[in-house]
Structures are given as C-alpha cells and as structure tokens.
Amino acid sequence: MAKFEFVKIADGSVLDYSTPSVVCEKTVIAKVKVPLWTGVGERIPLAELANAGLQLRYVPDQSAARVEYEKITKLYNADSVFPTRVTELKAFYDELGVAYTATTEMIEEALNVKFPDDVEAKTTYYARFNAALLNVKINYQAASRAAGEDFVDDFTVYRDFPALVKWLPGTYEESEIPAVRHEEIITTPEREQEAKDEMAHDAELAEQAAQAAQEQ
C-alpha cells in the first residue's frame, strides 16, 4: 500500500508516519522532543521536519496498469506455450468481430450472423472456438502454477483475456509499458500534494475495480 514515512537525515533510519514526536539536538545542545503533529492532526511543514532531522519519503504503490503488465508478463515467461494459445483464441474473436470482453451471448449472436443458415458449420466453428478457449484455460493454470501463483478459475480467464491480448509478446512498443513508480524524498509542498492526489486516485480506482468485480 502506498504510504509516507519519515526518514532520519543523519542515518537514513525510518520512522512510521504516525510517529507523534522525535528526539533531536537543538542549538542549545540539548535533546528535546519535537512534536511532528499539531493538536488538530496536521503534520508540521517540511522545513520543520528538516530542522528535526527528518525527511519525508513517499513509498508509492505501482499503478494498476503496471501491476497488470507485470502479472501478465510473469505468466507468459512462466509458460512458453501460453502466448500461442492466447493468439489462437484471439484469432476467433477477431474473425467474429467481437470485443475481447464479449459475453457468451455476444459470441453466440456473432456466430448466428456468421452462419445464419448453416447449423453444421456453426456447430463445428463453435467447437473449435471452445477448444481454443479450453487450451487458454489449461495454459493459464499451468503458467500460474509455474509462476507460483494461486489456482485460477474460469472467471479469471475471462476477466484477464483483454489484458492477455494487450500484452502478447511482440505486439506492443516498449514506450507502451507502464513506468515503474520509485520511492522518493518529498522536498516541496507541491510534490507532497501531488503524491497525496496520486494515492487518492489509486484508492478510487481500486474501489471501482472491487465494485466491478462484485457486480460480475
């Protein structure tokens, strides 16, 4: 979880962000307890933190896009056959002209459009589609085991299929890869506010994703 933490300038040791005060040396050459928070729950300014021998470090979460990218590439690296299986299933979606998020009903409708009067051809095609889907499920589970991840159910395969297609090896530019967020020392109030806004935005996205998962 993204967070702020205090870092001692002198030796780099870390204090929890909820630390109420810190003992430091003042010009009177005496150790005094410096409150880090006011009585109304506001933290002292960055300049006063520095006077108390502390820095503010921002420890960010990775973006949802970066987490997705790392998850999918880890699976592909764990099972060399997996990308081929996803490519095979993708070809069926592309031929039917449906989105990679298509429901069973949408796929059935697309099949009816493609084979309006040929039940046998539709049945044969649907069997091939299901075989390709089964192969993706099997290889997803194999890749998960090889990567040390938990067992995945059918819903996970359907949910992740758009991401599996998006990050197929060799199909995207390096510039499209989401950047890694790094820890940083906050030096200005403006950057601190940006970090707070980033944390709030990530929390909102996480809540939306959780709600969407419950509705499916």
Image (spheres, grey):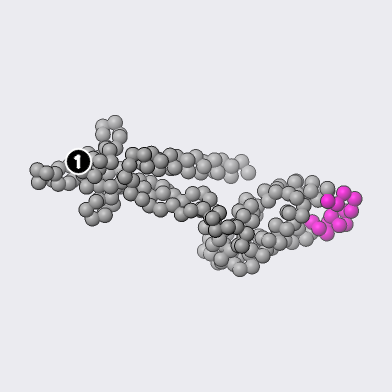
Q: Give the percent coordinates (x, y) of residue 85.
A: 67, 63
Residue 122 is covered by the magenta coloring? yes
Q: Give the percent coordinates (x, y) of residue 200.
A: 45, 40
Front-lying residue, 130 or 36: 36
- In percent of the image, x 75 and y 50: which residue is there? 97
Toward the right, the furthest residue is 117
Magenta stretch: helix, strand or loop mostly? helix
- Amino acid of disc 1: Val
- In percent of the image, x 27 and y 37: which residue is there? 44
- In percent of the image, x 26 and y 54: which residue is there? 13
Q: How many marks?
A: 1
Q: Give the percent coordinates (x, y) of residue 78.
A: 56, 66
Reply above or below: 14 against 44: below
The answer to which image quadrant residue 146 occupies is bottom right
Q: Could you tell me if residue 20 is visible in this image?
A: no
Residue 1 is covered by the magenta coloring? no
Q: Label 1: which residue?
A: 34
- In percent of the image, x 52 and y 42: which residue is there? 205
Segment colored magenta: 114-126
> Which image quarter holds the C terminus?
top right
Would residue 178 be found to the left or right of residue 98 on screen?
A: left
